[in-house]
Amino acid sequence: MSRRRVAWATIGTVALLLSGTPAANAAEGRAPDVRWAHSVSEDLGTLAVSISSDSAITGIRAHIVSAATQREVAVVEHEAFGLVSGTPDDGVWHTKQPLNLADLGSYTVRIEAADTDGDRTTDDSAGTLAYYVAAVVEDVRTDRTEVDNDHRQVRVDGLLKGRWPATRELKPLADHPVDLDVDYWTEDTVRTDAEGRFSGTVTVNDAVPIQVVYRYDGKHPNVLYGESPLTRIGVRPIATRWTVQAPAEARTIDFGQQVTLTATLERETPQGWVPLEGQSGGVLFEPSSGGQFTSVGYFTTGGDGEVTFTHAPWETGSFRVASHSDDPFIASASSNSAKITVLRASAFTSFSAVRTQDGSVHVEGAMDFPDGWTPATIPVHIQYSPDGEQWTDLLTKEAIWSGSGHAFSADIADAKDGYFRAHFKATDSFRAATSKTAKVSR
């Protein structure tokens, strides 16, 4: 071939490469990406590998290298893997059977991967195979699900086994330490017997969970952590009660008058109810109008369990005595007192009745409510008596604020001679009031 023909042949080959021949496509393809490789958490002898690529993965080879000796101990070929999630070009692969290695321990995993396009990659440190015995805690039982003040000890029994990575076989683990945790804190450590069984007793001082935990032990370095489900232990508190004595004062009082409340806190015992000393609590007042409870005092019970409290309620309502203990073995208790009716004062500041020229009687006057509250409406009853002894309602007028008092007035036609007065009837919140008497004659 002439030099000219060689030159043209070379140029043609380059042009073909640049124009997208299969060889160029292979060169430009994306190599498989080995994301990770490690043991399946619940099945430590099974190797999981995550790989993605621009085409389906057609080849996986795993080299298992001892972390202790750096020697390769096994090679896992593609046929041993199966796709468990995702797609062939972006998925997770597991070995179909657990690996069967001679020794327990930690192994570095080196992965070779290839895809349909012929792209290949090697990851010399894709992850770690934790080829260990997994501790399994079984058959955990407690002798009680509830504790009380006099019975706080809980016995815990169970069985410790290990799951071997090669076979998944569960075998008892003899002479291994087991922690008995109460509310996530270790209260006792016991050891298993020849059959892997264990037993221990813990003290429970609240409504908390109990859990059995196997933690790393230097004498058994190839057995990994294991734990049981939580077992909830409840508390049965001592029953308590309040006995409230009726106030020494009348249950209907004037606004500003104090009421003395006496109550006794008791606890239940096999011998009956006895006073409970040293318990903290408070006194609440609940208005009958439906408002919220308001704290009006605090206390600590004495040796006789008694509390004495004096208070001037501002409106009609009842007291509630309530106690709460930081000790979960003592129940809270509360009790209402009898209703205390609080009446505010009402008074007539003026009243007059005079005969007019047309023969009718004109009455007028004013009221005051000195305790600061005023009724929503103020009906004033104008009364008549021929002798000042027996009284009859003639009419009712509503007192209205006048700027200096709550004023009212009325004209009574054809009124007879006699005595006139104004009367305000008692309500749930105000006392009754009667004006002075006015005599009218012709």
Image (tube, grey):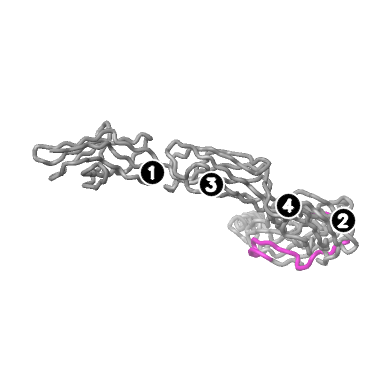
* Type of the residue with mark 3: Ala
Pair 1/2: label in front:
1
Q: CA distance from mark 4 to mark 3?
A: 33 Å
Pair 4/2: label in front:
4
The residue where tag 3 is placed is 246
Which numbered dot is residue 73? Answer: none
* Type of the residue with mark 2: Arg
The answer to whether mark 3 and mark 2 are in CB contact below 8 A is no
Of pointers 4 and 3, the one earlier in the residue sequence: 4
Which numbered dot is residue 191? Answer: 2
Of pointers 3 and 2, the one earlier in the residue sequence: 2
Residue 47 image-quadrant placement: bottom right
Pair 1/3: label in front:
3
Q: The magenta stretch spans which residues?
A: 84-108
Tell which of 383 and 72 is nearer to you: 383
The residue where tag 1 is placed is 429
